[in-house]
Amino acid sequence: MSLTSLRTRLAATPAMQAAVNGRPRTGDAELRAAVAGRTVLVTGASFGIGEATARRLAAAGAKVLLIARTAERLLEVSEELGDDAYPYPCDLTDFDAVGELAARLLYEHGPPDVLVNNAGKSIRRSIADSTDRFHDFQRSIAINYLGPIRLTLALLPAMRERGSGHLVNISTSGVRGLPASPGWSAYQSSKAAFDVWSRSVAQEVRPDGVASTSIYMGLVKTRMSAPNFATLPGLSPEGAGALVCDAIVRRPRTAGPSWVGLADVFTNGLMRGTSERVMARAFLHNERARAARD
């Protein structure tokens, strides 16, 4: 067996997966006790983490409000989940439509008990290949930052007035545990912007009974990650959804793999210069290898 094959097998073991990407702790009975009869809104609910989260919440007795751009698929998921799943097709980059949707949600269901801001867009492209693609940055900011802010701002006053609620914001370990990475400028910057926004807002709304959790998710094997990380081991959408449900039940301020906090101290603090030089060299090596293949 080659060293590469051995590393791949070890990385795919449950113990290593738990160490790298996190281990869900909440059982079905505990989840049901926490969410049965409560209203949970999930964005990006037609595929991946959002779909898996919605499925587990619906199975636990929650009333699930599903938001996604892909209307046909969203309707399919809703029908599969049953009578307590409500589909609301909406493009979160259409800010006027988001405002109208929020007003409809409040009228039909009242303020949600939990808002899971999950919808997002990933893009990997070097800055050399981005000079004529300003729209990549506009799109990333629109879906990863401005869209969830528009939705949250529209729902938050009613949650604060009621005196309860929970904002669950799906971020990435690339924001906290890893250094700024070449090729990921559009994605990481937009996710970092929403992360800082949500942590700032959390301090203001906590006295009103509204909790906030930032989840720094490890690698999840979804349609979004497949183009860049198909060969790397990662969580299944169901595993990631279980971590989201953990956060809904336990309501921590932050959640994610155990290594993220320590890594952040070193990669973005004590050894920031070293970590960025390592990333730069790796990027240059990969670019040269790609050029040689072409």
Image (cartoon, rainbow, N blue to C red):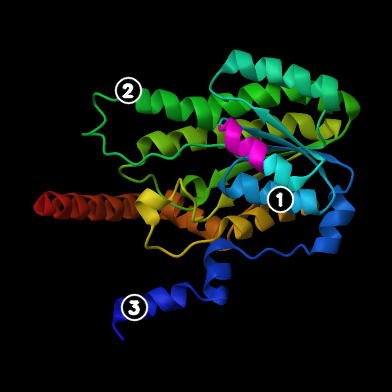
Mark 3 or mark 2, earlier in chain: 3
Mark 1 or mark 3, earlier in chain: 3
Above or below, 165 relative to 133: below
Span shown in magenta: 70-76
Q: Which residue is mark 1?
A: 55
Contact between labelled residues 2 and 3, with CB atoms less than 8 Å apart: no
Q: Which residue is mark 2?
A: 134
* Residue at figure coordinates x 45%, y 45% from the top left: 224
* Residue at figure coordinates x 58%, y 55% from the top left: 237
Above or below, 194 relative to 266: above
* Distance from Cα at disc 1 to Cα at disc 3: 34 Å
Residue 160 is situated, as x and y percent measured from the top left of the image, at 83, 26
Mark 2 or mark 1, earlier in chain: 1
* Residue at figure coordinates x 26%, y 39% from the top left: 126
Q: In front: mark 1 or mark 3? A: 1
* Distance from Cα at disc 2 to Cα at disc 1: 36 Å
Which SS does the magenta portion mostly show? helix
* Residue at figure coordinates x 83%, y 33% from the top left: 207
**Mark 1 neighbour class, 10 Å CA radius: few under 14, some 14 to 19, many 20 or more:** many
Q: Secondary structure at mark 2?
A: helix
Q: Which residue is mark 3?
A: 5
Res 284 label: none
Residue 44 visible in the displayed image: no
Residue 79 is situated, as x and y percent measured from the top left of the image, at 72, 42
